[in-house]
Amino acid sequence: MDVIAVVLVPVASLLVVAGAAVLIVVVALKDTASRDRAVVLRAVAEVIRAVRGRGKDR
């Protein structure tokens, strides 16, 4: 196996997932009242954990 592919593919996929998470947060917080931001961020965190396959207890 090519060493570059072994290292580059996981790093690139991690960057894509991190970028998607940031985009989700930005879109979710747009035009959100400050009193509702904590609830929105908690919900986004749960979605990201579900996509990654990790539950609350981990």
Image (spheres, rainbow, N blue to C red):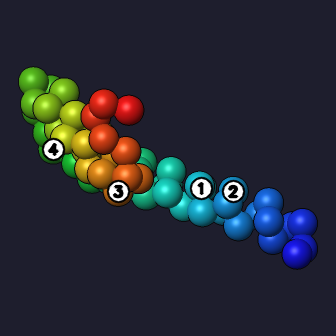
- Foreground: disc 2 or disc 4: 2
Q: Which residue is mark 1?
A: 15
Of labels 3 and 1, earlier in sequence is 1
Q: Nearer the viewer, residue 55 or 43?
A: 55
Above/below status of 11 relative to 9: above
Q: Residue at x 59, y 55 (%)?
A: 14
Please tell me whether mark 3 sits on a helix, a strand or a loop. helix
Q: Quadrant of residue 12?
A: bottom right
**In the picture provided, is 13 more to the left or to the right than 39?**
right
Above/below status of 28 relative to 13: above
The residue type indicated by label 2 comes to Val
> Badge 2: how crowded within 10 Å, few (<14), some, or many (20+)?
few
| Circles 4 and 3 in contact, beta carbons < 8 Å | no
> Badge 1: how crowded within 10 Å, few (<14), some, or many (20+)?
few
Q: Which residue is mark 2?
A: 11
The residue type indicated by label 1 comes to Leu
The label number, if any, that marks residue 51 in the structure image: 3
Of labels 4 and 1, earlier in sequence is 1
Q: Quadrant of residue 45?
A: top left
The residue type indicated by label 4 comes to Asp
The label number, if any, that marks residue 45 in the structure image: none
Task: State the separation of the CA atoms marked 3 and 1.
Answer: 15 Å
Q: Residue at x 88, y 75 (%)?
A: 1
| Circles 2 and 1 in contact, beta carbons < 8 Å | yes
Task: State the separation of the CA atoms marked 3 and 2.
Answer: 18 Å
Task: State the separation of the CA atoms marked 4 and 1.
Answer: 26 Å
Please tell me whether mark 4 sits on a helix, a strand or a loop. loop
Viewport quadrant of the C terminus: top left
Q: Nearer the viewer, residue 52 or 44?
A: 52
Q: Which residue is mark 4?
A: 31
Q: Nearer the viewer, residue 8 or 6?
A: 6
Please tell me whether mark 1 sits on a helix, a strand or a loop. helix
